Amino acid sequence: MDRRAVYGPRDGTVLSQHRSDEILDGDIDEVLQAKRADGKFWRNLREQDLPIRVQQILHQIGFYGVYRCGRIQYDCHLITALVERWRSETHSFHFRVGEVIITLQDVQVIWGLPIDGEPISGTDLERTSVQWQEYCMQYIGFAPEEGALKGSRLQVKAIISYISVSTSLRHSTPYCCIVCACCCIAPAGVERCVDSSGNLVSEKGKSAIGGALQLVQIWAWSRIIPLCPGLGAHMYI
């Protein structure tokens, strides 16, 4: 049987570089591995209660819901299945029932994030590494090593290492600010399905995925009920 004729699209070129095209060749065993660097941070929080001051700041900036979601175990098979349905051209999942997207309303409901007002985005390309070190010292209380900086980006593991060895400063303003930053970015990551090189993981040959996988997985559980652990199975017996 010609799988492509039966299950494939009318125009085969639309899947020529998409990982779902490999399914038509019978290759269904490769599962994307989730890339994450937040394990040490959450272990540190389990060992020590989150300072009240940090919780208050998270409430004020609207990120307390992100922190409350915590660190969940990723279902890599589920995430892989979703990526196989992902189309980068439309930024949507293509299911048999039609196209589906994760909306701002979903983000607000799942994470409790405010979605009104102007978006905050952009990259500062003018500062040098030394200037970024000075900036970090001024606003978050420590100057990361130059190797931990890549342009305007700071490695999460550098922040987490600093938090782990600076417990004596738990109630200082810089410490509270940096813990708040970790609570915001550790679960959130980036917003698109990309790998470490910035390429779309929906393309063939990709083996790992990073980003806001927590949001994607909770969204799938809430919108596709049969996938929800402990709930979907009972509803469809």
Image: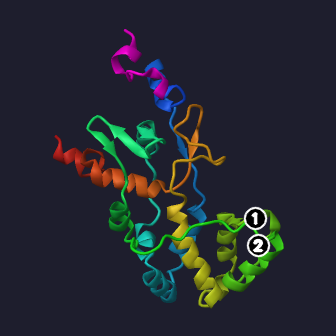
Helix, strand or loop status at disc 2: loop
- Residue at image position (46%, 87%) is 56
Residue at the spot 26% in from the left edge and 38% down from the top edge:
97
Total numbered badges shown on the rendered structure: 2
Residue 85 painted magenta: no
Whether residue 127 is situated above or below residue 195 in the rendered picture: below
Would residue 38 appear left or right of 147 to someone viewing this image? Answer: left
Residue placed under numbered mark 1 in the picture:
148
Asked where in the image residue 168 lies, by quadrant, the reply is: bottom right
Give 202 or 45, whichever is nearer the viewer: 202
Q: Position of residue 78 (x, y in %)?
A: 40, 43
The three-letter amino acid code for the residue at tag 2 is: Pro
In the image, taking residue 233 as reference, residue 212 lies left or right, namely right
- Screen quadrant of the C terminus: top left
User: Which mark is on residue 144?
Assistant: 2
Q: Position of residue 91 (x, y in %)?
A: 44, 46
First to last magenta residue range: 1-14
Identify which residue, 203 or 111, lies in the foreground: 203
Look at the numbered disc 1 and give the secondary structure of its residue: helix
Amino acid type indicated by mark 1: Ala
Residue 112 visible in the snapshot: yes
Q: Residue at x 77, y 72 (%)?
A: 127
Where does the image place residue 152, in percent across and percent down from the top left? 71, 66
